[in-house]
Amino acid sequence: MKTVLVTGGFGRVGSVVVPLLLEHGYRVRILDVKTNPSAPYAQDVEIRQGSLTDEAFVQEAVRGVDIVCHLGALFPPLFFDEKQIISVNVLGTFNILQAMKETGVRRMVFASTDATYATGASLDAYDRPITEEQELWPSNVYGVTKVVNEVSIRKYARMFDLSYVILRFFWSMRSEEMIRLMFQAEMYTDGIVEEDKQGLTNETIVAVRLENGEPFYDHITDFRDIGRAVFTAIEREDVRNETFNIAAADRVDYAVEAPRIAEALGVPFRTIRVKGIHNYEADITKARIQLGFEPRYGMRGMVDAAIEQANRK
């Protein structure tokens, strides 16, 4: 029976990964800065509460496990302190890698992000779906920390005979978050073209368009699919030293989904133009072929779940 250390094991992705591991006979040790005693799996795991920035603590947490599943990180919009993001994400991952080297743990599954590509608020437009070969050019500190971590992981793998799978998640989403984060005007306040602000309220459902009025599309992932992808990467020890995009099977079509959300909720609907955004779409062909990942949750089903959740409130 193998033991997996899951950093951030009480987070949104961890809440999917840990039960899957337990169900399939793994022992699980969780390293997290906060614990959640009410989590359904809390009594079935070993818990180490502490910070990734504590080198001695991390080394003891890593000691004796077979695989490290490194999900723990700080990310915006919850954290805007760039120094703190760099400290936890970069130093924390360095501590994990050092501990693996010193304790003889040889495999890591690492949670990276589409922010390495500067999706959405990108510096340039993408004229084709993004593959894993796309140049990494992050536009925020969070993305920078993940690029640094990916480079560090590859360096340690080469120098110390470690193996890894890096998973670049495209905007992890829960159904209860989707409407607020993607379809309500308040999320775009700073970027909305001035003449499109007339009559908007924070609750207005919006179909976002580019600043020039052309359609906008992007790509997200249901957090349950991300959890399944992580579990698959842990299981597939034959897949070594590879990087994969993880996303929903289809991209978001705001022009289609926003009106039906507004109708279902009985709230105002508008089309708005937003400055500083660019279209993007994930190519998940490599994950499908090499990792065997197939997303279960498409956009229509995710939006249906979001509407159902909103109507319960």
Image: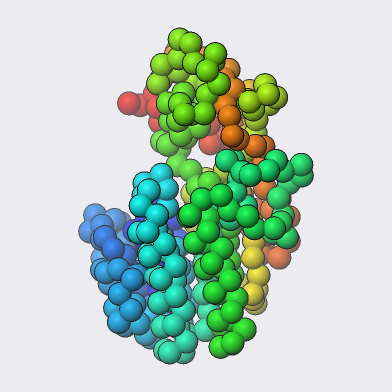
Q: Is 63 on the left or on the right of 158, as rendered?
A: left
* Residue at (35, 59) in percent of width and height: 84
Q: How many marks?
A: 0
Judge from the rendering whether residue 272 lies leftward or rightward of residue 80; answer left or right. right
Q: Residue pushed farthest right?
A: 128
Residue 258: x, y in percent?
Answer: 56, 23
- Which residue shows up at 40% across the image and 54% down it? 82
On the rendered image, what quadrant is the C terminus found in?
top left
Measured from the top left, where is residue 72 in percent x and y? 40, 63
Q: Is residue 249 visible?
A: no
- The residue lying toward the viewer, choosing from 297 and 57, is 57
The outermost residue toward the top is 199
Q: Which colour scheme appears in the figure?
A: rainbow
Regarding residue 148, the answer to whether it shows in the image is yes
Residue sitting farthest toward the left: 37
- Tell me which corner region of the image, top left, top right, bottom left or bottom right, holds residue 276: top right
The percent position of residue 24, horizontal first and vertical second, equals 47, 69
Q: Quadrant of the N terminus?
A: bottom left
Q: Residue 218, position in %: x, y?
A: 62, 38
Asked if residue 55 is positioned above or below residue 72 in the image, the reply reads below
Residue under the image location 65 percent in, 37 percent down:
278
The structure residue drawn at horizontal position 54% and vertical position 13%, both measured from the top left corner, is: 195
Image-quadrant location for residue 189: top left
In the displayed structure, would residue 124 be above or below residue 93? above
